[in-house]
Image (cartoon, rainbow, N blue to C red):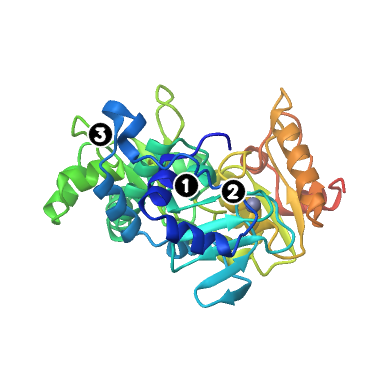
């Protein structure tokens, strides 16, 4: 942390006593980067961010609320308005993360990082300052109701587009119970904007959510849509388009985590179509990380209780899925979890395994044969 982030600068520049009060709880730390108390705009020239707007943003997003929305739980109170908990920014074993709700600041005694909600977003999402501000604005601005409304709209479209239903069939999603359970929809393109503006949502709000492009077109065209927490995943039907898309912002936590978190054994897959076929085959202790790279929140979720994780990533010919699984297995074992590697036949993912004749007893044997 050689240079101070603008967030900290303004924060510390605006009120030294406030900084000192905060640091009274973190006495010996030099890492908040307050050596240069400059205003936001001092070194950013044209990119300067209106300081009042940043103050407003921070006021609208209390740090504690943002942390809790990202699955952080305080472990114990320190004093009025000050809490300790596990650090969401590094793999923490005993609570070293201090949150001061009076000052809206955090500090970690483990990894030595601290600051305000913008600084937290920078580190947590691994983005630079302007992107962190953009993410927070988006987080504030995208009312859950807008995404829910979009998901509802897409679900209605699914029933009207036989090509979408045919695609789901071809990928092994055949029961309406599963479609309802996963709240699967379809984005034909060219109608979401009209549908939602008709319901009273503004075009800027749709743009901000990423549902509509800057040019005013629906962002998702010919995509199967799966609602996630705070996002929508879109799988393209067309081979000409990128297969996987998310709206801007985080992909959220593990898919369907609430349903499986009590389970002592969890099957982890990388794609929602894998998730779907396993669920359909009766394996309901399945969750999905939407890719082989788990974000910090997903990793924390997996580690939130002792359990066995069956890593069932794709058996790609180039071995990338298996390498990712090996790395993840090591990290999970470091956290005291049991991790087992499920070996699918080469070239298969769980979806193709079932689509090409695999059945539940066969998959069960793979689980039993999984390498510890
Ligand atoms: Zn930390």
Which mark lies nearer to you, 2 or 3? 2
Residue at the disc numbered 2: 113
**295 or 242: which is nearer to us?**
295
Tag 1's secondary structure? helix
The crowd level at tag 1 (other Cα within 10 Å; few <14, some 14-19, many 20+) is many
Which mark lies nearer to you, 1 or 3? 1
**347 or 108: which is nearer to us?**
108
Identified at 62% across, 52% down, the residue is 29
The answer to whether residue 287 is left or right of residue 153 is right
Identified at 40% across, 28% down, the residue is 238
Residue at the disc numbered 3: 213
The crowd level at tag 2 (other Cα within 10 Å; few <14, some 14-19, many 20+) is many
**349 or 166: which is nearer to us?**
349
Q: Does the closest atom of ligand 1 sit within 8 Å of the Cβ of label 1?
A: no
Residue 298 percent coordinates (x, y):
60, 52
Residue 263 percent coordinates (x, y):
70, 67
> Does the residue at mark 2 contact the one at mark 1 (Cβ under 8 Å)?
yes
Q: Earlier in the sequence, mark 1 or mark 3?
A: 1
The answer to whether residue 215 is left or right of residue 8 is left
Residue 8, compared with residue 67, is above or below; it is above
Residue 208 percent coordinates (x, y):
26, 43
Residue 181 percent coordinates (x, y):
47, 61
Residue 369 visible? The answer is yes
């Amino acid at each position: 942390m050689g240079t101070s982030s603008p967030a900290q600068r303004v924060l510390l520049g605006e009120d030294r006593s406030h900084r000192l009060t905060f640091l009274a709880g973190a006495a010996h730390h030099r890492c908040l980067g307050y050596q240069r108390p400059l205003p936001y705009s001092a070194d950013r020239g044209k990119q300067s961010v209106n300081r009042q707007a940043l103050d407003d943003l921070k006021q609208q997003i209390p740090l504690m609320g943002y942390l809790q929305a990202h699955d952080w739980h305080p472990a114990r109170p320190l004093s009025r308005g000050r809490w300790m908990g596990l650090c969401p920014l590094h793999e923490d074993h005993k609570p070293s993360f201090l949150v001061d709700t009076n000052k809206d600041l955090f500090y970690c005694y483990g990894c030595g990082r601290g600051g305000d909600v913008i600084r937290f977003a920078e580190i947590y999402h691994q983005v630079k300052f302007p992107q962190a501000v953009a993410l927070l604005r988006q987080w504030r601005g995208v009312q859950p109701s807008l995404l829910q409304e979009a998901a509802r709209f897409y679900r209605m479209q699914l029933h009207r587009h036989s090509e979408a239903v045919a695609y789901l069939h071809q990928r092994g999603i055949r029961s309406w119970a599963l479609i309802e359970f996963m709240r699967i929809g379809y984005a034909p393109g060219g109608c979401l904007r009209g549908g939602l503006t008709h319901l009273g949502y503004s075009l800027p709000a749709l743009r901000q959510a990423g549902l509509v492009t800057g040019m005013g077109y629906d962002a998702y065209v010919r995509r199967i849509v799966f609602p996630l927490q705070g996002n929508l995943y879109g799988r393209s039907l067309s081979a000409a388009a990128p297969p996987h898309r998310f709206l801007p912002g985080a992909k959220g936590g593990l898919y369907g985590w609430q349903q499986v978190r009590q389970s002592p054994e969890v099957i982890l897959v990388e794609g929602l179509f894998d998730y779907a076929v396993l669920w359909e085959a009766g394996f309901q202790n399945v969750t999905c990380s939407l890719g082989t790279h788990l974000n910090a929140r997903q990793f924390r979720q997996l580690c939130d209780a002792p359990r066995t994780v069956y890593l069932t990533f794709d058996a790609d010919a180039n071995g990338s899925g298996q390498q990712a699984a090996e790395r993840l297995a090591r990290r999970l074992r470091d956290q005291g979890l049991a991790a087992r590697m499920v070996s699918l036949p080469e070239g298969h993912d769980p979806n193709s395994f079932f689509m090409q004749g695999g059945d539940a007893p066969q998959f069960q044997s793979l689980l039993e044969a999984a390498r510890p």
